[in-house]
Image (cartoon, rainbow, N blue to C red):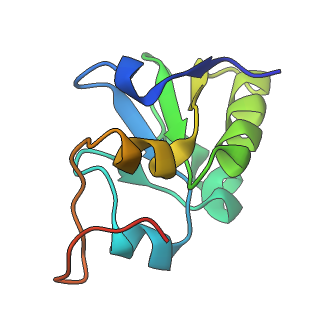
Amino acid sequence: MVPEVDVRAVPGGAYLLDVREHDEWQAGHVESAVHIPLGELQRRVGEVPKESTVYVVCRVGGRSANAVAWLNHVGWDAVNVGGGMHSWAAAGLEMVSETGRQPAVI
């Protein structure tokens, strides 16, 4: 089990790490999120701050749960965003797109 919060419980200004693939990120993401695909996380973990809680999101919660488990194992304080970007979009929370189209979760 990994710690998890509802999308509405992610604090404003929190460090939000999006571990989805590049095409998913481009289609729609939280504007303030930081993008490090799961496959790059171990190599780029030094970019993730240790001084604050890291909220991790993916499409539905599986990849982010794996990232949270690993981050917590190696010394970070990480929490999974339950339901991922699907839940974020369903809650009507703001998203942006890099495609010039309406943000979407793919």
Examine the rendered structure and indicate whether residue 77 appears above or below residue 103.
above
Q: Quadrant of residue 67?
A: top right
* Residue found 49% across the figure and 27% down from its top: 54
The reply to whether residue 24 is in sight is: yes
The percent coordinates of residue 86 (x first, y second) are 49, 51
Quarter of the image where the N terminus is located: top right
Is residue 75 found left or right of 52 in the rendered image?
A: right
Is residue 13 found left or right of 73 in the rendered image?
A: left
Examine the rendered structure and indicate whether residue 22 appears above or below residue 2.
below
Q: How many marks?
A: 0
The percent coordinates of residue 44 (x first, y second) are 57, 53
* Residue found 40% across the figure and 37% down from its top: 16
* Residue found 21% across the figure and 73% down from its top: 102
Q: Nearer the viewer, residue 46 or 91?
A: 91
The percent coordinates of residue 48 (x first, y second) are 48, 38
The percent coordinates of residue 104 (x first, y second) are 35, 68
The reply to whether residue 47 is in sight is: no
Is residue 29 found left or right of 55 in the rendered image?
A: left
* Residue found 59% across the figure and 17% down from its top: 77
Is residue 84 found left or right of 15 in the rendered image?
A: right
Q: Nearer the viewer, residue 19 or 1?
A: 1
Q: Residue furthest left?
A: 100
Q: Quadrant of residue 27?
A: bottom left
